Amino acid sequence: GEYISVIGHSGCGKSTLLNILGGLLQSTTGEVFLEGKVVDEPGPDRAIVFQNHSLLPWLTVYGNVAIAVDKVFGHSREGGKSRAERHDWVMHNLELVQMAQARDKRPHEISGGMKQRVGIARALSMEPQVLLMDEPFGALDALTRAKLQDELLEIVAKTRATVVMVTHDVDEAVLLSDKIVMMTNGPAATIGEVLAVELPRPRNRVQLAEDPRYLHYRKAVIDFLYTREKHVERLAA
């Protein structure tokens, strides 16, 4: 049920770490465990939302969510749902991200923010134990990003999902997270510090903007990234 953000400079291995958690990459040493089982391949218990929405362009908004629901909850599978139940579950997740009205549109007919909403709905529809997000709002304009952040806060509160998110955005990390994992610089990057963000939920970005606790956490992350771990570009010889 925790929201964890991983933050650090480019090249420190944030996305690599997320891909290892998702089973898309094998770690060279060590192992990842989820519920006592080793993670060594992709699976529906871990859903990934990429910066690039990764929607299938020939499917509608509905179809892009339904393809995941059918795969995970096909009627012939253990714990499967009937066709009617799968339809209701697709619509439930589209409503959760406010995209039910666009169910018949294709990806080229909707905005970038709407595409990310569909990507989030598809991930949530799998009922994963862990939701992995790789800079999900990084390609969006500031206003769209802020709106989706606020909506994600509400969704996580409703679903009690466990989330691990990679981000470059200090304010995003503090607003959304219960813990912020701050990484040292690459190439031999490690976890430098884990900051617990003890701000009450639900969180309101306008009220938090002047909250001294919010400013304290924000300053702590900035101090780590730009003072103790100041980024120096390493150019190839």
Image (cartoon, rainbow, N blue to C red):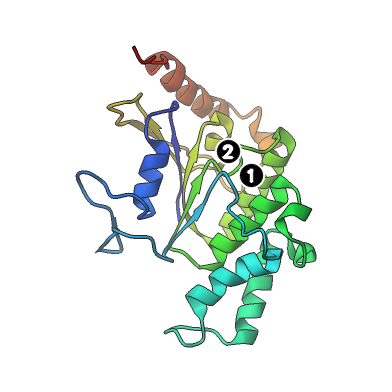
In the displayed structure, 14 sits above or below 164; it is above
| Disc 1 crowd, CA 10 A, few/some/many (<14, 14-19, 20+) | some
Q: Quadrant of residue 15?
A: top left
In the displayed structure, 192 sits above or below 115; it is above
In the displayed structure, 18 sits above or below 106; it is above
- Which residue sits at x=50%, y=48%? 133
Instruction: Look at label 1 and name its amino acid.
Output: Gln
Residue 206 pos. (x, y %):
71, 35
Nearest to N terminus: mark 1 or mark 2: 1
Residue 132 pos. (x, y %):
46, 51
Q: Quadrant of residue 157?
A: bottom right
Describe residue 124's horizontal placement relative to residue 19 as left or right. Answer: right
Foreground residue, 124 or 153? 124
Q: Quadrant of the C terminus?
A: top left
Describe residue 116's horizontal placement relative to residue 134 as left or right. Answer: right
Residue 224 pos. (x, y %):
41, 21
The number of discs equals 2
Q: Quadrant of the N terminus?
A: bottom left
Q: Nearer the viewer, mark 1 or mark 2?
A: 1
Q: Residue furthest top?
A: 237
Describe residue 195's horizontal placement relative to residue 199 as left or right. Answer: left
Instruction: Look at label 2 and name its amino acid.
Output: Leu
Q: Are marks 1 and 2 in contact (CB under 8 Å)?
A: yes
Foreground residue, 72 or 60? 60
Which residue corresponds to mark 1?
149
> Marks 1 and 2, Cα distance to the nearest angstrom?
8 Å
In the displayed structure, 56 sits above or below 132; it is below
- Which residue sits at x=39%, y=54%? 22
Task: Identify the disc placed on residue 175.
Answer: 2
Judged from the image, the secondary structure of the residue bearing numbered disc 2 is helix
Residue 144 pos. (x, y %):
72, 41
